[in-house]
Image (cartoon, rainbow, N blue to C red):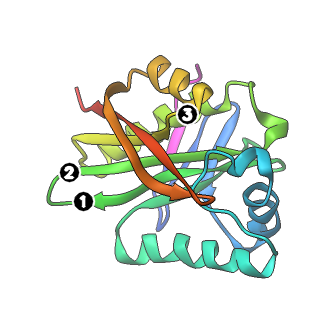
Amino acid sequence: MNRINRIVKNEFPKIKTDRLQLRKITESDHENIYYGLSNPNVIKHYGISFDSLESTKEQMIWFKDLEQNQTGIWWAICSSDNKTFFGAGGLNDLSKEHKKAEIGLWLLPDFWRQGIMTETMPLICDYGFNQLGLHRIEGFVESDNLNCKKAMAKLHFHYEGTMKDCEIKNGKFISLEIYAKLKI
């Protein structure tokens, strides 16, 4: 895995490796976000979906609200030259009091199984632990999302339990598995 070449200190943090760039999500990403969050393969295990480009503006507002309210941070995940948009990822539900946040990430299907997720998640965790002062990063994974569960284990997130039938998705109850990583 590539090490972080640099974290550019400015108003919004940019993280760059030899292969990837995590940068601020902008209006120019709107169509890519719609493409991802309307794709049945992406949203199968993701809690949000949009049926129109116009409705995707809700997600753009959510990204801005996280930053403004300091309840999280999400990045566009791109190639290091910023020419290719791979997906988005970050931290949300940030609790300063309890020093924890929830990690999330999605990729466009064209970029699955290329190691992007396993390269990006440690970058996000490192930022959370070392820049935000978090002690715990949590991940909530739908029980039937086998690929994500494998990735969580590979990235040293520890399985803590299952919340059975805790949410309704598409009219059916789903169970969520809890994974967590603590700052060492």
C-alpha separation, residue under disc 2 versus residue under disc 1: 6 Å
User: Which residue was labeled with disc 1?
Assistant: 95
Residue 180 visible from this viewpoint: no
Sequence-first disc among 2 and 3: 3
* SS assignment at label 3: loop
Discs 2, 1 touching: Cβ within 8 Å = yes
C-alpha separation, residue under disc 2 versus residue under disc 3: 26 Å
Q: Amino acid at mark 2?
A: Lys
Q: Which residue is at a point 38% across and 49% down the rendered structure image?
A: 102
Discs 1, 3 touching: Cβ within 8 Å = no
Coordinates of residue 148 in the picture (x, y in percent): 56, 31
User: Which residue was labeled with disc 3?
Assistant: 5
Residue 3 or residue 39, whichever sits in front: 39
* SS assignment at label 2: loop
Of tags 2 and 3, which is closer to the observer?
2
Q: Quadrant of the C terminus?
A: top left
Coordinates of residue 140 in the picture (x, y in percent): 42, 43
C-alpha separation, residue under disc 1 versus residue under disc 3: 28 Å
Q: In the visual, does 23 lie left or right of 38?
A: left
Q: In the visual, does 174 lie left or right of 52?
A: left
- The secondary structure that dominates the magenta segment is loop
Q: Which mark is residue 99?
A: 2
Residue 170 visible from this viewpoint: yes
Coordinates of residue 48 in the picture (x, y in percent): 61, 62
Residue 74 colored magenta? no
Binning the other alpha carbons within 10 Å of mark 2 as few (below 14), some (14 to 19) or many (20 upward) gives some
Q: Which residue is at a point 35% across and 60% down the rendered structure image?
A: 93
Q: Which residue is at a point 74% across and 62% down the rendered structure image?
A: 33
Highlighted magenta segment, given as a residue range? 1-7
Q: In the visual, does 69 lie left or right of 6?
A: left
Q: Amino acid at mark 1?
A: Ser
Sequence-first disc among 1 and 3: 3
